[in-house]
Image (cartoon, grey):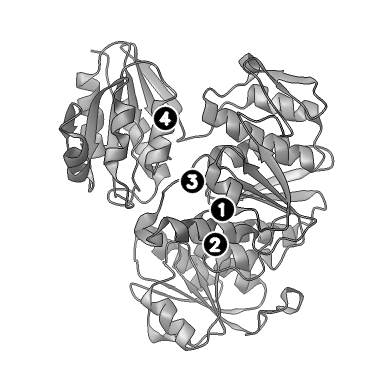
Amino acid sequence: MDLKDRNKISIRGKKISVIGLGKSGYAATLLAHHLGGKVFASDLGSTQEILDRTNLLHQKGVQCETGQHSDLIYDADLFIVSPGISKDANILSKAQDHNIPIVGEIEFASWFTEAPIIAVTGSNGKTTTVHILAAMCQSDSVNGELAGNMGIPFSEKVIDEIKHPDPNRVYILEISSFQMEFIYHFKPKIGIFLNISPDHLDRHRTMAEYVAMKLNMVQNQISTDAVVYNSDDPQLATSLNDYPGQKLPFSLLQSNVTFPLNATKVYDADGEPFIYMYEVALPGKHNLANMLAAATAANHIGIDKKNIADVMKSFAGVEHRLEHVKKLNDILYINDSKATNLESVIVALESFDKPVVLILGGRNKGADFRLLLPHTKRHVKLIISYGEAGGEIAAALGDAVRLKRLTSLMDAVATAHTLASPGDIVLLSPGCASFDQFSNFEERGRQFKSWVDELEVN
């Protein structure tokens, strides 16, 4: 199948193998089927969720297999792979040997829309930023639609667009490095880079490879496109030099930006006061940076400044990201399940000035937990490690910080409740992937909140 010219791509009558039936794979299967592709969907798993999806697909006449990737997948003109499947997987090497083009779900869906795309990536803050930007991009002339890594497959939205065209639609996509491994034509009108710090090194192996995957997001941009980037991040300031899009920096420290600031207020590009710091709804410097990234992009596409300021004053956060769950016995329980890397944990710790009982654990993604040591000295009174990485966390931190190692997150919540004192914060900020005990960080966060809700007053 020839993918050279995006405008000439047609999958009608083509054999499409979709590898992986998670949310994005399932949505890509539906989109490919809707567009006339002969789809074969394959998943190694056989969970009830996967089986339910295959049953629905069978009802539509789509062939599926579960519990294996048989040789049937190689009878294909195109592979669409879920982001959970590494580019180094044997089945993908074999597909390449068969000269089968391989794309990800984001790339695939992008072929079938002409709506402008604003794509957001970074090691931390993506989910918060896309939600902020989507709230800003709601007006009579702009309808911001969220999709991507935050849990809504792009393919699902593109099917909706095909069925219900909307000339005001602007896609706001959260993009992970995994989703950029197989890119041909994907091109956002605006690419937003929040920050770059070590993450997913278990998959990408080196920091250079991780950065390269992130930068793939804007490899197809032209001079009329734009890149919004954090000029306080030295990695970004140099890495984007060779890309043609217009550079639109944002910063907490520098003045040559669209929205400069001082200790008390943010200014607009004309040097006029825009919003006072005390009015910004989300606490923390990291959230202010996310706000400024979104505001810079929104301003670039012509969103009214009053709408931008109103969102900065009212946006209270997203689920699983420093989410206040409950106050019990004057102990505040906070769900930061979205923190799947150490940089996110550090950001969370720096958001508080009260004693913290920190719950860490899950499946390590190649992080060195010793990097947390300088950030535990100020007010971390206890670390509770759990799950697959529990022993590794204990070995790295146990000599320097009071630490208890447990098996499950449920036990960690119960123990934190017992050992925390009035005035403390119990913070679930795992610094790890969730896959040892949960299907995703959302399930982990919901379970944490459920167990906290069951706690009783001492």
Residue wearing tag 3: 123
Residue wearing tag 2: 180
Q: Quadrant of residue 156?
A: bottom right
Coordinates of residue 319 in the picture (x, y in percent): 49, 35
SS at badge 4: helix
Residue 276 visible? The answer is yes
Q: For the residue carrying disc 3, how many other residues have a C-alpha within 10 Å: few (<14), some (14-19), or many (20+)?
A: many
Q: CA distance from mark 3 to mark 2?
A: 14 Å
Q: Amino acid at mark 2?
A: Met
Coordinates of residue 182 in the picture (x, y in percent): 54, 69
Q: CA distance from mark 3 to mark 4?
A: 14 Å
Q: Quadrant of residue 66?
A: bottom left
Q: Amino acid at mark 3?
A: Ser
Q: Amino acid at mark 4?
A: Ala
Residue 174 visible? The answer is no
Coordinates of residue 291 in the picture (x, y in percent): 63, 32
SS at badge 1: loop
Coordinates of residue 430 in the picture (x, y in percent): 33, 38
Looking at the image, tell me whether mark 1 or mark 2 is earlier in sequence order. Answer: 1
Residue wearing tag 1: 175
At 61% from the left edge and 73% from the top edge, which residue is drawn? Answer: 33
Q: CA distance from mark 1 to mark 2?
A: 8 Å
CB contact under 8 Å: marks 4 and 2: no
Looking at the image, tell me whether mark 3 or mark 4 is earlier in sequence order. Answer: 3
Residue wearing tag 4: 348
Q: Amino acid at mark 1?
A: Ile
The one nearer the camera, 133 or 224, is 224
Looking at the image, tell me whether mark 4 or mark 2 is earlier in sequence order. Answer: 2
- Left or right: 19, with 354 as reference point: right
Q: For the residue carrying disc 4, how many other residues have a C-alpha within 10 Å: few (<14), some (14-19), or many (20+)?
A: many
Tell me: residue 324, above or below residue 210.
above
At 59% from the left edge and 28% from the top edge, which residue is drawn? Answer: 288
